[in-house]
Each structure stands twice: as structure tokens, then as C-alpha cells.
Amino acid sequence: MGNAGGQWQPYPLWGGRGDWCNEEVVGVHAYTDAIRATLGSDFDPSGSTVRRTVELIPEPGNPHDRYAVSVRASNYLIGYLARERAILFHSRLIGLIDRGLVPTVPATIRAYDQNRWDDRPGSPVDLAINIDVQLSEPHLIIPGNEPPDVPYTMLPHGYSVQVTKVDEHFEILRHFVEPEGELELLVTLHEIDISTAKTEKKLVEVRVEGHRIGQLTPQTSAKFLPAVRHLADRGLVTVGRGWFKGSSVSAQVSLTALKAHELPGDFLAGEPRTVITLDRPRRTPVLGASSVQSAAVTLVTRTFVIDLVTSQPLTPWQQKEALKLLRAATSAVGNDIEEPVVTDSSVKATVLQDHSELIANAVAGIEDSDFSLANEYRATVGSMRTLS
């Protein structure tokens, strides 16, 4: 998307938090008349603070500084970003301009009329001015991925909640690791059913580019599920802002979005809130139709129940070893699998189908007091878990 029909489209930069404007605009006193015009009727000569949305326009043709970034409001030039900061943002802002998008940020303009000590009647009145814009770090001003290609709406920004089980999906998240160690992502929220014969449990699963990257705790899920369900009834996928921190060996994700009870009525019933696509290539592998599935489906299609009767009674020590083995096996499936059961005459556990033959042989090894297979399995369960 961009300047469809020759029209420039505003692009609100990401990364801002609340109403705080943190970046000072420099050179404002050279543009006093323009700033007065920008303030309009909102200006009180005795002092006022005015909120405006301003544009950040890179000026590669500026004869004084090819990295200059001007700040403009209502088509008026009102100042510049400090040079050391402008250099950091310049290329990213150029990238948006090249797509027909105008980078915008909130700004606070504080101004009042002041007289110099030697002012005389009829002399011009000075305007004291301070302008700040809300600007994040350069790597955070646009999301790290594209919005989904299905109808969706984006939850308003809210307090941060942790996404769990992220460490199980590092093979997906490693595609988003940046040198700065952090990135904001567009994540989608989906209801999944992980109920067992004994308990009923519905959670919110978190995905990026269709891939599962974790889930919310039962308590947190309960605070988002009403909104996810309501929007699904409207034919919309729920999207939130995911704060990703990662390195070559680890990752963390938190969701920063309003919970269901915090959402205003105009959001739930209003037009979908969307993000302008930048038409960038996706970072993760494309999912095949058969592989687009939640954790709940994975448990049904890829698990195997081992239910064995031993040929001779197991000693208490053998039972202990068998239980340790089966607990390791079920942990590869997930934390929501029922606890394995071991008695003196039987063993029962739910394991990954891909592991079932190996685990059955390991259990037989325990029965024969040959623990080499069991120990080998426990030693490699970390790598086997990646198959789930």
C-alpha cells in the first residue's frame, strides 16, 4: 500500500508508550511564525500545551545536512530532529517515503508569549517554545512482520502480559532475532481446547505468521478469551502487539494489549483497526495446509498411548525408574498431558507417536533390569522434544 491514486498516506510510527513525548525538536525559534499558525485558536498567550500529530520528513537534498529530518505540522516546517538522532532514523524514514507513506508521530507543543527586559511598547513579542515528539528507537518504529492476510482487528495497546512456552518454539522465533535484541511483532490470538478426560481447559494460543510461538496462562487467557470469541463471531482474527526479546540461544515474548474488560464499546462494535502493510517478505517458512494446526490438534494427531502389562512384577526401584522415564517422555508432548501411571504390573503413558517404539523398548529394558535404553532416552529427551 502507499500513495494509492497519487495520495500520500500517513503512517503512524510504532514504539510509543502512553502520552509521553520524549524527543526534543531543535531549531524551533527559526520557525516562530509557522508554529503560531500551527497552534491556531488553541494557543493561549499566557501559556498553553497543545497536542498535535506531526510528520517526520527526511531531506536527503538538504544542502546543509543530507541526513536532516524535518518536523512538520499542518504543512508548516516547525523544526528538526537533532542531527545525531536524525542520522539513525534517516534510512528507515526514507524507506517509508519510498512506499508513499508519510511517517507521523504525536507531538507536544508548549508555548507562551514573553517580553525581553528591554522591550518597549510596539516592539515584537517573543514566543517561548518547546516541542517534543514521541519517538522510539530506530529498530522499533515499524513492526517486525506484516499483518495477517485474513480479516482482523488489532487490540489497543495495554499492559504487558507474559507469553508462556516460548522456549519450545525457538526454531520459529530465531527468524526474528535482531542485532538490537528486541523487536515488536504482530501476533495473532486463537482459542484452543486442551481439555482432558478430567479437566476442561481453554487457552489463548499466540501465533506469528501462522506459527505457534506460545500460549497465555489459564488465568490470563480468561481475560482475553471473551474478546477473541466476540471478534471471531464477527469473522475477525484478534491481533496484538508482541514484544520480542531474543538472542541466538533464547527468546521471550510478552503481549501488550488491552484485556476484554478494558476494551471500549466502540472497539468491539466498530470498524476493524488495521496496520498498513509494507509488503515485506515473511521471515518464517510458509505453512502447508496440513501443518496449520494448534497445540490441541497436535496432541490428537501425533500422540500414542503406551499401555503395557509387565511379564513379571516390577520391584519398587524398577517402578521408580519407569516413572522417571515416562515423565521425561510425556514432557516432550507438553505440560497438559496426564501423569503417567506405573504399578507393579503395568505402565501407562501418553507419548509422541514418533517416540513410541523407542520408549516401549526402554520400558522393556527396565523390566529386564537393563537401564541403558532408559538412561539414553532421558539423556536425549531435550533434543527429542523439538520433534513435537
Image: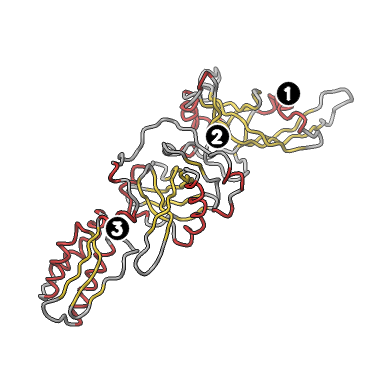
Distance CA(mark 1)–CA(mark 3): 67 Å
Marks 3 and 2 in Cβ contact (< 8 Å): no
Residue situated furthest right in the rendering = 121
Instruction: Return the residue at label 3.
Output: 299
Is residue 377 left or right of 139 when viewed as pictured? left
Q: What's the residue at 30%, 70% (across, down)?
A: 339
Q: Amino acid at mark 3?
A: Leu
Q: What residue type is disc 1 on?
A: Asp
Quick one: SS at disc 2? strand
Image side of residue 362 versus residue 297, left or right? left
Residue 319 location (% of width, % of height): 20, 78
Give the image quarter of residue 126.
top right
| Marks 2/1: CA–CA distance | 26 Å
Vertical relation: 3 (above or below) 234: above
Instruction: Indicate the secondary structure of the residue bearing disc 1.
Output: helix
Q: Which mark is residue 106?
A: none
In terms of sequence position, does the residue under pointer 3 or pointer 2 come before the other?
2
Q: Residue at x 28, y 57 (%)?
A: 300
Q: Which mark is residue 33?
A: 1
Q: Residues within 10 Å of mark 2 (few under 14, many from 20)?
A: many
Horizontal and vertical percent position of residue 177: 37, 43
Q: Which residue is mark 2?
A: 12
Q: Amino acid at mark 2?
A: Pro
Instruction: Name the mark nearer the viewer: 2 or 1.
Output: 2
* Viewer-proximal residue among 64 and 258: 258
Mark positioned earlier in the residue sequence (1 or 3): 1
| Residue at screen point 64% across, 23% down | 75
Estimate how packed mark 3 is, as few (under 14), some (14 to 19) or many (20 or more) residues with alpha carbons within 10 Å: many
Horizontal side of 29 relative to 202 (left or right) equals right
